[in-house]
Image (cartoon, rainbow, N blue to C red):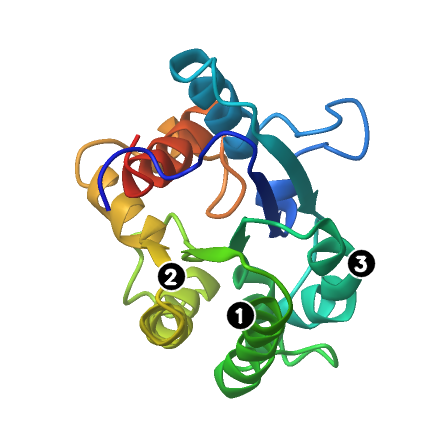
Amino acid sequence: MGGFVFQDGEKVVFIGDSITDCGRRGEHAPYGNGYVKFAIDLITARYPERRITYFNEGIGGNTILDLRNRWETDVIAHSPDWVSVKVGINDLHRTLRGDEAAVPPDRYERLYRECLSMTKERTKAKLILIDPFYLSTDTDSGSFESQVLKLIPEYLEVVRKLAVEFEAIHVRTHEIFQRQLRYRPRDHFCPEPVHPYPSGHMVIALSLLEALGF
């Protein structure tokens, strides 16, 4: 597919957890102040003639179960041309902690597939799947961070499998951040492993745009 994929007149939905939300329901309405806003502003700067409508439907703390429960109203109802999904780190955290709301990899895959299947059946939207990521290099201390890094490949494999199955554009943010961590410390991008500074959101936005042919 040559050139930038979002076309004039299209509608794009971004859905996910806090990394997508980024204050879009409050002081940073309507797009938040993270990667979604950065991507929109860069697209507008480069393609001023393309009138693209955007919806940020991120909600902090969400798992794929939460997304599944609101998919009808927050995705299907928009009749989108594109749907970008970024979810998984809350699912992983709650699974490791043994929470009642745990979403282990098999359940994550089932619910994620339900969301994507509904999108394909009821809209004409093309799909973008953004990997969950975790900014840590602690693989062997036995800490919670090392436990996350041990488990996250199972969630990443689900996204990879679904991207192939649904012919989605796949943005491998975990790999991209791991590469960044070979050159700079985590605190350049993130105060902890999950919620990036603007510098970290710029990494996500650039990775997304590159995958879209920007």
- The quarter of the image holding the C terminus is top left
Secondary element at tag 1: helix
Q: Is residue 126 above or below residue 98?
A: above
Left or right: 88 as drawn, with respect to 46 = right
- Mark 2, other Cα within 10 Å: few <14 / some 14–19 / many ≥20: some
Going from the N terminus, do you reach mark 2 or mark 1 first? 1
Specify the quadrant of the image occupied by residue 23. Answer: top right
Q: CA distance from mark 3 to mark 1?
A: 25 Å
Residue hosting label 1: 92
Mark 3 or 1: the one toward you: 3
Identity, as a three-letter code, of the amino acid under mark 2? Ala
| Callouts 3 and 2 close, C-beta under 8 Å | no
Q: CA distance from mark 3 to mark 2?
A: 22 Å
Going from the N terminus, do you reach mark 3 or mark 2 first? 3
Q: At x 31% / y 57%, what residue is drawn?
A: 138
- Mark 3, other Cα within 10 Å: few <14 / some 14–19 / many ≥20: few
Counting from the top left corner in percent of width and height, residue 113 is at 53, 78
Identity, as a three-letter code, of the amino acid under mark 3? Thr
Going from the N terminus, do you reach mark 3 or mark 1 first? 3
| Callouts 2 and 1 close, C-beta under 8 Å | no
Residue hosting label 3: 73
Counting from the top left corner in percent of width and height, residue 107 is at 57, 85
Q: Which mark is residue 168?
A: 2
- Mark 1, other Cα within 10 Å: few <14 / some 14–19 / many ≥20: many
Identity, as a three-letter code, of the amino acid under mark 1? Leu
Q: At x 53% / y 70%, what residue is drawn?
A: 92
Q: Nearer the viewer, residue 147 or 142?
A: 147
Specify the quadrant of the image occupied by residue 139. Answer: bottom left
